[in-house]
Each structure stands twice: as C-alpha cells, then as structure tokens.
Amino acid sequence: MYGLRPPETPDWSPGELLAVVQAGRRREQHTAVMLHTHAALCRAAFGGKFPAVFEAFPLWTQEEVYNLKAQRLREQLMQHTKG
C-alpha cells in the first residue's frame, strides 16, 4: 500500500506508518484533481465535445474499442427505452 512493503517497515512506529499512508492518500487525491482538470481542459479544447477515453488516449486495441463503443450504445439504448 502506497509503496510500502512489510519487510521495509518492521521498526516503524504506528504514527510513522499513519503519516506515510495519509501522505499517499493526499497524493492520490491530488492526482485525481489533476486528471479531472486535464479532462476539463481537453473538453474545452475540443469545443465542448468530450472525447471518449479511447479517442483521447490510444491505449486500447481495436477489439477493445469496438467493445467500449458497443457498451456505450447499449447504455444509450437502455436510457432511451426507460425515458
């Protein structure tokens, strides 16, 4: 957790361990804020149309892209039939 391995921390006090865990949590929160801000900036750069994650970051295979698109279409269809 947060880069800690039990063999490295046997002589740490509970307070030291808590401080490292709390720092890791703050680091995760900071990363989440940065990612959210980045996504908002991307949205503004694309003229208000927010791109899909696989369009913005080409890290997925073509098959995974097809599956993500199919899932999005299923969700849209379900929303359309409900409302």
Image: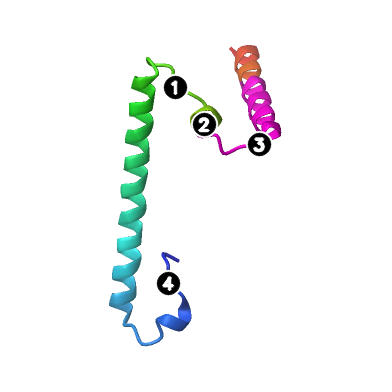
SS at badge 2 = helix
Distance between mark 2 and mark 1 Cα atoms: 9 Å
Residue range corresponding to the magenta coloring = 57-75
How are the colours assigned in the image? rainbow
> Which x, y percent locates residue 38?
35, 34
Mark 1 against mark 3, which lies toward the viewer?
Answer: 3
Mark 3 against mark 4, which lies toward the viewer?
Answer: 3
Residue 77 vs 4, above or below: the answer is: above
For residue 50, what is the image quadrant? top left
Q: Which residue is mark 3?
A: 61
Graded by Cα atoms within 10 Å as few (under 14), some (14 to 19) or many (20 or more), the crowding at tag 1 reads some
Which is the main secondary structure of the residues drawn in magenta? helix
Q: Which mark is on residue 50? A: 1
Residue 17 vs 7, above or below: the answer is: above
Would you say the residues marked 2 and 3 are in contact, meaning their CB atoms lie under 8 Å apart? no
Left or right: where 22 falls relative to 60: left
Mark 2 against mark 4, which lies toward the viewer?
Answer: 2
> Which x, y percent locates residue 18?
32, 71
SS at badge 4 = loop
Instruction: Name which residue type carries label 2.
Output: Val
